[in-house]
Amino acid sequence: MSLRVLHVLDHSIPLHSGYTFRTAALLREQRRLGWQTFHLTSPKHGLAAGADAPRDEQTVDGLHFYRTPASRSVLARWPVVDQWALMQATEQRLLQVAQQVRPQVLHAHSPVLNALPAINVGRRLGIPVVYEVRAFWEDAAVDHGSTTEGSLRYRLTRALETRALQRADHVFTICEGLRRDIVARGLPASKVTVIPNAVDIEAFDVGSQPDAALKAELGLADATVVGFIGSFYAYEGLDLLLDALPALLQRRPEVRVLLVGGGPQDAALKAQAQRLGVADKVVFTGRVPHAQVQRYYDLVDVLAYPRHSMRLTELVTPLKPLEAMAQGRLLVASDVGGHQELIRHGETGMLFQAGSATGLTEAVDELLRQRERWPMLRAAGRRFVEQERNWTASARHYQSVFERLAQARQPLAA
């Protein structure tokens, strides 16, 4: 069955994030099902760091995006009210685009700031709405430091999220942790479908050799490299990696930490390295062009994912460990719930107790001592993503739900 689906997104390519990469992969898989997909981004796309100059429409890598300009209202400058202004701008632009492209399904993606406008437009035009939850807005706000768990703002935001979940015609989410939380809010289990995070296998090579010149340039020529490549958010636990480094250096003086990327914790991490006396053992590269990221992956002997335990990390599965396994990389990760859904301890990677610098030190040291296990770990990780975590398999879960909704409710005349 050929369907017309209009997606409502927070932001998209050409910006680089796990959010945009998942979106692009799923859009291409929906198109392989024979569907026509249309794509609208919220005003937050234009406000993001690195975004292009504002425009009404943009085509990137064969995907055409309708952009939403930021609200010009003075109210958009006020805290809290600015979120309402974002939703109003998104709703107005979405109504315009929906009347133009006449979709059979509206597919809203996190955050709830996209879901509520989509539900309003869907009700007005008689179009079914699905809501895909990648994380909860209230938990993201806790991590960003704009609220605390259990605060009035947190409870109000959670209530808003629950309301959107209840009003959507169907809910998709990325992992079992989030699915359980959604069902616990009173939704029937039959209304919630998991579309697991996955990788494009063809995009990753196994066994690439390190670039000797780049390794020398970074002062890593004779080092054993423990690395992280991504955004430096507090929940990633990179502070724990630095806390573990002095003890690790006592056992293995040749170890160096390579941190590729940047983000809110950048300055704090550099200050921490100085305070611990390990600044000369940590290489901060800053952000690198996406086309160059593979060269940096090739320098790393062990990838570290030391996420702290909090609602966000216990519920949500990340993409990075899957990308590491797709490349046949060795990895250590904290045992938060999101990691436990992806990593089989001792089979596809090594898990350690979240929040424990000693546990992280032990896990890295054990992995480096047991080189005879490396081929098995690398092969098992690659096999896991090939067989269970590819985008084609994930996207198939959309088909029956979308076709049922499209047949049950036809758009009204605009």
Image (tube, rainbow, N blue to C red):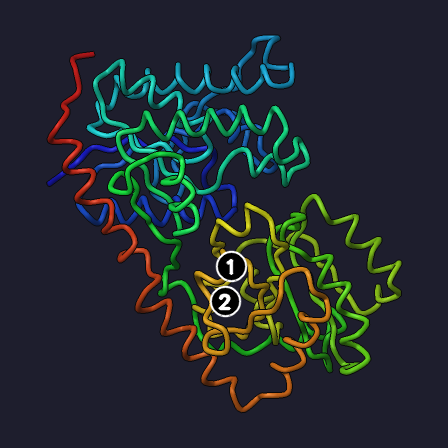
Question: Residue 258 occupies which quadrant of the picture?
Answer: bottom right
In the foreground, 387 or 194 = 194
In the foreground, 156 or 29 = 156
In the foreground, 277 or 28 = 277
Residue 134 visible in image = yes
Reply above or below: 3 against 194. Answer: above
The residue located at (27%, 56%) in the rendering is 392
Picture disc at residue 324 = 2
- Quadrant of the snapshot with the C terminus: top left
The residue located at (39%, 54%) in the rendering is 197
The residue located at (35%, 34%) in the rendering is 186
How packed is label 1: few (under 14 Cα within 10 Å), some, or many (20 or more)?
some
Percent x, y of residue 267: 79, 48
In the image, taking residue 275 as reference, residue 315 lies left or right, namely: left
* SS state under label 2: helix
Residue 214 visible in image = no
Percent x, y of residue 110: 44, 35
Amino acid at pointer 1: Lys
How packed is label 2: few (under 14 Cα within 10 Å), some, or many (20 or more)?
many
Q: Read off the residue under disc 1.
A: 320
* SS state under label 1: helix
Amino acid at pointer 2: Ala
Which residue is at the far bottom?
372
Q: Are marks 2 and 1 in contact (CB under 8 Å)?
A: yes
Percent x, y of residue 129: 28, 28
Reply above or below: 352 against 126. Answer: below
Q: CA distance from mark 2 to mark 1?
A: 6 Å
